[in-house]
Image (cartoon, grey):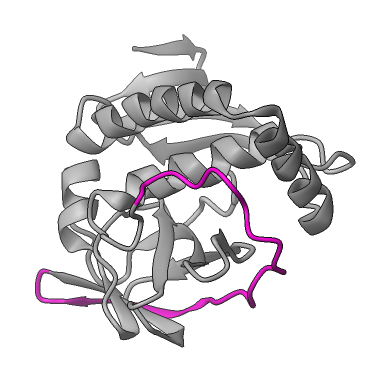
Amino acid sequence: MARVQLSALLNDISGKLNGSIFQRTQGGLCIRSNSGKINSNTISSNKRRVGLSIVQNAWTSLTDAERLQWKIYSQYIQIKQKKNPTLYVNGHQLFINYNTLRLALSYNNLLFTPALCTVPIMAPLGQPISINSLHMNGVALEVNLSYIVNNAQEVIILYMSRVLSPSQISGYQKLILMDAPTNSGNQFECNAVYYNTYGYRPTIGDWVQTKISIYDITRQSYTTYAEQRIQFT
């Protein structure tokens, strides 16, 4: 529902009206499209909720020695916390982070066997990768990478937002994991996952926010994320 204040001219309007959202900003009144809600009852969403519970239970089952190894590993790689960059992720947070992701990816990739990693490998993180372009080829959603993947030991980790309006320049968009199978080469295809998540397919000219990394089984870790706002071609 939109709240409208009338005068000789339209004086003020805020809220929702016919698929549009009116809001006040420092630059004045603006209008943007109202996106539909993301379906939170999808198979992928339910897997993530169950997965977090499984991983947390696995942490409580670790020995003190195993937890100490995760603490030492977190101090070794020093990943900054997202909400407070002055602090680093601790051993518990790192275990939850790594294994929630491993469990989500294990449904489509046998490399994660067993699905959970109880003991970290003390190895440096690999080099980050990025996206060269996004391309709609018929119904195929092709992600062209800056790196040639070896799917015998590497898995693509790609998060993508719903389609953005051209005026949405903020990087703070909700991103959802595109847990499609990884193939060898420099292309990643995730049309089915995107459609099942958001209920539609992007078209040429659409913009999305992405972040991408690559998981290396030999290191049992993934690279830092490259965050990009990209237009489909």
Q: Which residue, as the protein is rendered here, is positioned at the far left?
A: 138
Q: Quadrant of the N terminus?
A: top left
| Residue 154 among magenta residues | no
Please, is residue 136 above or below residue 34 in the view? below
Relative image position of residue 111 (x, y in whole percent)? 33, 63
Please, is residue 25 above or below residue 190 in the view? above
45 lies left or right of 52: left
Point 52% across, 65% down: residue: 213
209 lies left or right of 60: left
In the rendered structure, which segment of residues is drawn in magenta?
Answer: 114-139
Residue 85: quarter of image: top right
Residue 59: quarter of image: top right
Point 63% across, 29% down: residue: 63
The answer to whether residue 158 of the structure is visible from this angle is: yes
Between residue 145 and residue 154, name the one nearer to us: 154
Relative image position of residue 191 (x, y in whole percent)? 19, 62
Q: Quadrant of the C terminus?
A: bottom left
Point 21% across, 25% down: residue: 41
204 lies left or right of 146: left
Relative image position of residue 174 (x, y in whole percent)? 47, 40
Most frequent secondary structure within the magenta stretch: loop
Relative image position of residue 187 (x, y in whole percent)? 31, 82
So how many labels did they put on this image?
0
Residue 28: quarter of image: top right
Point 36% across, 21% down: residue: 16
| Residue 128 among magenta residues | yes
